[in-house]
């Protein structure tokens, strides 16, 4: 198992306030949890994955996600057991859309 952590500063899109947590599990190999958190405008993403050695790919997928969804004060946890980058992007989008009730 490998744990990767990414932090993106100066987000411009806030999540609803309060202790809401949204989880999206649409495939048997990925879980995304998203919640509002006081992070001084940042978005923190922690990934726990069984696919060791793919940090550069994860970073590219997370940067792409942050460009689509520049979240502020958001904490995201991803539990992965070998999902493809396309599935990861889809599940992240679904979690944010559920939380915001919107599309990018």
Image: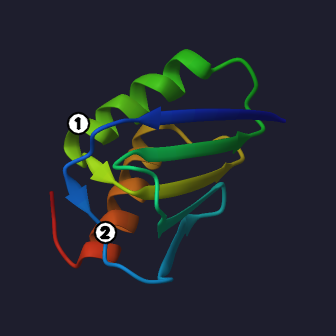
The residue at which mark 2 appears reads as: 15
Where does the image place residue 71, in percent across and percent down from the top left? 30, 52
The residue at which mark 1 appears reads as: 67
Left or right: where 82 falls relative to 74: right
Which numbered mark, 1 or 2, is in the foreground of this view? 2
Q: How far apart, in angstroms, are the residues tagged by discs 1 and 2?
A: 16 Å
Disc with the residue nearer the chain's start (1 vs 2): 2
In the drawing, what numbered circle is on residue 88? none
Q: Residue at x 63, y 20 (%)?
A: 54
Residue lying at the far front of the rendered structure: 40
In the depicted view, which residue is nearer to us: 4 or 44? 44
- What kind of colouring is applied to the model shown? rainbow
Where does the image place residue 13, in percent across and percent down from the top left? 21, 57
Above-or-below relation of 18 to 38: below
Task: Give the image quarter of residue 65.
Answer: top left
In the depicted view, which residue is nearer to us: 90 or 21? 21
Above-or-below relation of 65 to 2: below
Where does the image place residue 1, in percent across and percent down from the top left? 84, 36
Where does the image place residue 44, in percent across and percent down from the top left? 50, 45
In the depicted view, which residue is nearer to us: 80 or 101? 101
């Amino acid at each position: 198992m490998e744990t990767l952590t990414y932090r993106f500063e100066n987000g411009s899109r806030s999540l609803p306030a309060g202790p809401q947590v949204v989880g999206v599990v649409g495939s048997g190999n990925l879980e995304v949890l998203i919640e509002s958190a006081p992070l001084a405008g940042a978005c923190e993403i922690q990934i726990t994955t069984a696919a060791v050695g793919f940090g550069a790919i994860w970073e590219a997928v997370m940067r792409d996600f942050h460009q689509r969804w520049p979240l502020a004060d958001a904490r995201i946890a991803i539990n992965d057991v070998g999902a493809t980058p396309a599935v990861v992007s889809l599940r992240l989008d679904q979690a944010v859309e559920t939380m915001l009730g919107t599309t990018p």
